[in-house]
Amino acid sequence: MKRKKFSVITLINRILPNVCIILACMILTFLVINIFNTAMQFMTNDITTVLLFVLMGVSIWVSLLAIYYQRKLYAARQIMRKMQNYINKIDAENDGGSGDGDRE
């Protein structure tokens, strides 16, 4: 069995969606705590600002990856559809040509 080559980019691309979810949950938690306890000032903290910037960057990267893979999948499906149409056309020509041989 052939093994896939390991690459750091593939690993990062697999980890980023999870990082995005974790950061979004952290920010949601900070927002809820900030609503109930405004004295803590979670949303004006420097760490929260950094987390928001990291979440923004990761979200943009994951979105770009999703768009790339969707377009790649769409192109592959288009190629498969063209190949299937070509095969069907050849099969139809071969089926139409076979018979008792009195084709004009």
Image: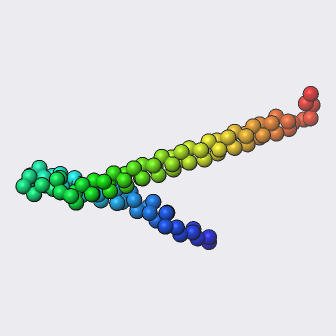
Quadrant in the picture for the N terminus: bottom right
Q: Nearer the viewer, residue 5 or 81?
A: 5
Q: Nearer the viewer, residue 86 or 93?
A: 86
Q: Residue at x 69, y 39 (%)?
A: 85
Q: Residue at x 39, y 59 (%)?
A: 16
Count of numbered marks: 0
Q: 53 left or right of 29?
A: right
Q: Position of residue 35 (x, y in %)?
A: 11, 49
In the displayed orientation, state which residue is furthest to the front.
Answer: 46
Picture layout, residue 36 above or below residue 89: below
Q: 14 left or right of 83?
A: left
Residue 85 shows up from this direction: yes
Picture layout, residue 97 above or below residue 41: above
Q: Quadrant of residue 5?
A: bottom right
Q: 7 left or right of 81?
A: left
Picture layout, residue 8 above or below residue 32: below
Q: Position of residue 103 (x, y in %)?
A: 91, 30
Q: Residue at x 15, y 56 (%)?
A: 42
Picture layout, residue 94 above or below residue 36: above
Residue 21 shows up from this direction: no
Q: Residue at x 73, y 40 (%)?
A: 86
Q: Position of residue 24 (x, y in %)?
A: 28, 54
Quadrant in the picture for the C terminus: top right
